[in-house]
Image: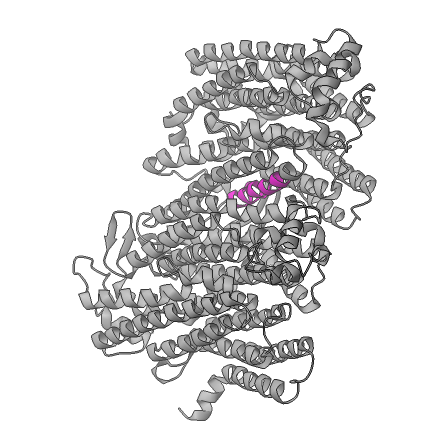
Amino acid sequence: MLAWTVYLSFLGVLALMFVPGANVRGVRTIALLTALAGLVCAVAAAFGYDTKAGIQTVAKQPWIPALGISYFLAADGISLTLVLLTGIAAVVGILFSWNIEHRAKEFFAFYLALIGGVYGVFISFDLFLLFVFYELAIIPKYFLIAIWGSTNREYGAMKLVLYSFVGSALVLIGLIAAYVIAGLQTGTYTFDLLALAKVQFPEQFQYWAFPLVFVGFAVLAGLWPFHTWAPTGHVAAPTAASMLLAGVVMKLGAYGALRVAMTLFPLGLAAWRGEIAVLAVIGIVYGALVALVQRDFKFVIGYSSVSHMGFVLLGLMTLTTIGLSGAVLQMFSHGIIAGLLFAVVGRMVYDRTHTRELADLEPMGLNRAIPFAAVTFVIAGLASMGMPGFSGFIAELQVLIGAWQAFPTLAVLCGLGIIIGVAYTLRAIQKSFFSGNILEASIQRFNDSTIQRFSESASRPSNPTSTLETISIPERIGAAILIASTVIIGLYPTVLLNLIRSGFDSALMAPLVKGGPL
Amino acid sequence: MSYLDVLILACPETIVALAALVVLALDLAVFRRRPWATRMRFGALAVTIGCLAALSWLWGTIPVRPLLHSDDVLVLNSLTHLIKIVVLLLTILTAWISIESQFTDHVGEYFALLLFGTLGMMFLVSTENLLMIFVALELLSLCLYTMTAFNKQNVRSAEAALKYFLFGGMSAAFLLFGFSLVYGLTGEITLGRIGRALNPSTLQPFNPSTLPDPLLIVALIMVMAGFGFKVAAVPFHLWAPDAYQGAPTPTAAFIASGSKVASFFILAKLLVAGFAGAGGAAAWRGFTQGWMPLVAILAALSIAVGNVAAIAQSSVRRLLAYSAIAHAGYALVGVLAFGSPTPSASTLQPFNPSTHHGFTALIYYVVTYACTALGAFGVVAIVEGSGSTVQRFNDSTVGPPDDLRAFAGLGKRAPLLSFCMLIFILSLAGIPPLAGFFGKFYLFAAALSSGKDLALLWLVVFAIAMTAVSLYYYLQVLKQIYVAPPPRLDDSTTQRFNDSTTQQPFNPSTLQPITPSWPAQASVVILAAAVVILGLAPNLLVGRVLGMVDASRLFLR
């Protein structure tokens, strides 16, 4: 069942190839149906999962026997949580790109290819296979951003892809070295994660291999100081791609760091744990501070992602049950919330006003023009700043408790980051939606300031003197799905927490929780 | 051994030689007056038939055990058969691609040279005799020089050929000198016996404290200079960008594909079997004299120069040339993996795993690279052929016809072709699940597992890091194809065209959808499919080659 999330996505790509490009409606429908089918598979697998089962094998076939590489798909609670997130994000992303007409077929083909790669990473337990899916997800991102993006898109796309690729190159070095050393030690060459995790790698090797693999993955999770691709990439990307980037692609990095780097190299983890926790906290505070002074609405959200992903990395470094489960829950929660924020900024606001400058948005009084967007953004903002009742609160609280046990000083600094988070979120809400007083005056000023600047996009059907286009049905459905997810997890977190906690019971992950090998 | 036996052993080669003569004669006698396109198609058909005949003979007579001719002039085993089959297939596809580009009136001669070049490769693959290696290499090289110069209307073609020829002649001299030194040292001309003569104590590991004969070092450097030229490794690479750019596209494709496969195959065999005892070591801060440090330096330089210089290229062919240089560097890493002494733990295995894996990885890598490069050049040929208007103003305003801008908007003009190019370029960049990724991965894994204590780690780390650099320029090509808008009639390019050439206004037909001839299109699609299939199921090739390497008993003779 779970394996079909991957197959369906690629079948969707294949199906799209045979649809005429002019038939945009058909293209969209196929994409949506594919994503929905994937989500159904994910949900069914999550509900059908027995939390006592540990790591459940989905498929295991020899692939390249000469090298000990197998086609090994499996899942545990952590994988399922993230697969579920991917399913939700995929469906919602398509709903929010319902208005794409320009080369729609290619857009959705790349989109589904990216989704397929992401699903694959989350359920691969053979490291070679995992790496294949991991890199498979890189190239679609380039095209999604470079073709359908906005500000500075080619630069943003190239930067993102090169960062991802450099990160994966680091990972590849570490993986090949681990494979060879394990092979020399045990006599059997294999990429099976479960088998490799049992190998005691030499301490000297772990000492350099751990940071290599961890950082290689964490580049994609926005680890400071390797985070700079994230804001530019998010800003340049079209709405659906931003949602996916922040929503699931950044989680690929965090997941890889947890699943591969931390399980394979426990001694390296123990040695570098403090340093990485410090980097994570710098990311939290720095991201929040930078978000506080951004002029571009989307950059605020972009930097907030860096800040929130810092919580994930910090949670991973606590090595306590509560911290680790908080980190995984934060991955889920941030995926949902960031998706919602980008949807409001990119689709609801930018596609209608064609500006993201907070200074330009201020006089427009968007709370009256598009009240639905305003309400959605307020909810998303509250969830993002960690208001109780939303998923963000549960996740960040757990990370903080874990951090308090492991690194008290850093926990305090991290609390500072939360406060700044409140500040930049409120600032963004206020400037974007609740500044303008009178609708007419705002329209007048909008005429003066914006039309000339964006006259090059005259082909778009925007007539600034009329009221903004109302929020469409797909957008409403998408927003509702995301809000519902964050509220449900916020009010009843046990649903996911049971799943996540069970993930840390398996023989592979359990050594982490006991505070590592020490 | 009677001549008849030799003829039977060399039957596929004989078939190819006969096919070359037939093509020449028929084109002269029958097709001289026919239209150009007919002659091209006939030539390609004849090449196909000839190669298929040789191929089916090879297929039917795969030897179970190695067949030897006296003095190892011909050494046939399943591995050499496989490489020959690959070379023949590549030749057929090259011939199909040739149909697309109109560069010569001497159709028969061109295809005859193509076949003679293939003949050179086939002999090169199946010999272990120094003299025969040299003769086969020269046969191949002379054909390639001539084929490079074939476009008589283009100055670049002549320039490229002259450069290629001068460099090539020089390096052939170096190679021959190196061979003569080896002969002087050992008194032998077959690889196996040279290997034994150079390393009398075969049972003991090579002892680095006893320095090898300085004469041997000179010989090694000479040989490496000669082969470095052949595979375009830095610093012997200078001919490559010019030759790739100036040569007619099918010739460039041939240089990049079949010739690379044969050269790397024989280079690996020569070094590992012939200089078995003179390997030395290429560990970080642990260089000891022998051919391994030489190869390691050539590899590192090629990877660095190829990848960095490619970034600055605006011509797709030069870009592919530098990428070929970088790939030659990666393949040299495979040669190192092949030749490194193996770690102790391998005693667990019935055979020497890293050596077998090293050679297998090298073969997989060069074969898949050849498919990819040939395909990429096929696409270039089709695009250039379609943009004939641009081509005519070659040297004046817009630069060469293979300028990156000529690919702008190709995704719209030729969706299938663009998709194939996407596959080739991503495979060159090493993106899974394409063959290029598995090739690199396998190569690096084999290199790392060879030698003591991860001896080649430095080289592998460096190579992987440079792979990350390479993605940048590969994406530049894809950016033109998919992201950049197709050139419009009203933009500045048109203006420049019309300014520079008043008598011939810009022809909008260059922007029409591209309709390549079906053989060219088919060969590109076949190659793309091969790259995908070999990437998804590497075991198709790897499993077989591993067995063949084992069966070839390269080290036991």
* Quadrant in the picture for residue B181: bottom left
Dominant SS in magenta: helix
Q: Which stretch is magenta?
A: A124-143
* Quadrant in the picture for residue A482: top right
Q: Is residue A140 within the magenta segment?
A: yes
x%, y% of residue A460? Answer: 77, 31
x%, y% of residue B84? Answer: 50, 73
Question: Which residue occupies the foreground of this view, A425 or B142?
Answer: B142
Q: Is residue B121 above or below residue A34?
A: below
* Quadrant in the picture for residue B137: bottom left
Q: Is residue A433 above or below residue B158?
A: above
x%, y% of residue A516? Answer: 42, 26
Q: Is residue B355 left or right of residue B287?
A: right
Tell me what residue is drawn at x 49 percent, y 18 percent: A286
Tell me what residue is drawn at x 53 percent, y 16 percent: A288
Question: Which residue occupies the foreground of this view, B265 or B197?
Answer: B265
- Tell me the quarter of the image containing the C terminus of chain B: bottom left
x%, y% of residue A33? Answer: 78, 38
Q: Is residue A217 left or right of residue A459?
A: left
